[in-house]
Image (cartoon, coloured by chain):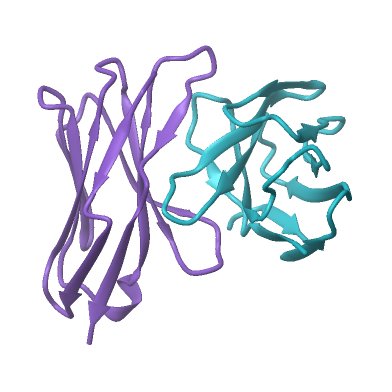
Amino acid sequence: GENVEQHPSTLSVQEGDSAVIKCTYSDSASNYFPWYKQELGKGPQLIIDIRSNVGEKKDQRIAVTLNKTAKHFSLHITETQPEDSAVYFCAAWGRGGYQKVTFGTGTKLQVIP
Amino acid sequence: DGGITQSPKYLFRKEGQNVTLSCEQNLNHDAMYWYRQDPGQGLRLIYYSQIVNDFQKGDIAEGYSVSREKKESFPLTVTSAQKNPTAFYLCASSLQTTDTQYFGPGTRLTVL
């Protein structure tokens, strides 16, 4: 089945700096890659996603890049703010009769004011 | 959290008790899911339902049961057979199983 590895597990950045979180996946048939932000004690919220026919997608300070050849995709947050502090999860949609989603183990991002 | 609600927010269970976690959505989604979240681990799928009156086991279904009698509701029962039930439980829904999943706010279950 699909295997998704996410790095780093924790990340601390100064306010205003950029943050990058990377995920690798194993199933070359995976075709959809969402990113979720989870604040403490809350459910994950979709922040951006990308499909396999696109190499990059941006939404204000957030961007996602996809390298299908290398089977990895990354979340980029620019001009980080304290409210960006949260746990971020990547996911990949692999093979399966029900389009199984496999989640990464999460990255705890701390933005230091 | 969109139109997905979970209750209660916190739940305490004694050893040997069954408890039921509620999940309701008003998004008119066909598919619904239950995940378990433990510290340092990704979300693990317990059960999912593609349509009313249908549900399938996920990766860690042992000790859990579900029902899908109504499109908007997908309750999860944690039975006494689940040996380590303390965790954060997340419900999600999507238009179909091929579509983006949206999550509820979660229920934190603690076994006393």
Considering only vertical position in the picture, is B1 above or below B68? below
Farthest top residue?
Answer: A97
Q: Relative to B59, is B54 on the left or the right?
A: right
Considering only vertical position in the picture, is A103 above or below A21? above
Q: Residue at x 44, y 48 (%)?
A: B41
Question: Which of A74 and A50 lies nearest the eye of the viewer?
Answer: A74
In the rendered view of the protein, which quadrant contains the N terminus of chain B?
bottom right
Estimate the x, y position of residue A95 in percent, counting from the top left.
41, 15
Total marks placed:
0
Q: Relative to A6, is B91 on the left or the right?
A: right
Estimate the x, y position of residue A5 in percent, counting from the top left.
27, 38
Q: Residue at x 84, y 54 (%)?
A: B15
Which shade of the palette goes to chain A?
purple
Chain ID, cyan in image:
B
Estimate the x, y position of residue B93 in percent, counting from the top left.
61, 39
Q: Relative to A23, is A47 on the left or the right?
A: right
Q: Residue at x 53, y 38 (%)?
A: B44
Estimate the x, y position of residue A91 in percent, counting from the top left.
37, 38
Question: Which of B26 and B51 lies nearest the eye of the viewer?
Answer: B51
Q: Residue at x 27, y 56 (%)?
A: A9
In the rendered view of the protein, which quadrant contains the C terminus of chain B?
bottom right
Q: Quadrant of residue A54?
A: top left
Question: Which of B112 and A29 lies nearest the eye of the viewer?
Answer: B112
Q: Relative to A62, is A106 on the left or the right?
A: right
Considering only vertical position in the picture, is B101 above or below A16? above
Considering only vertical position in the picture, is B30 above or below A8? above
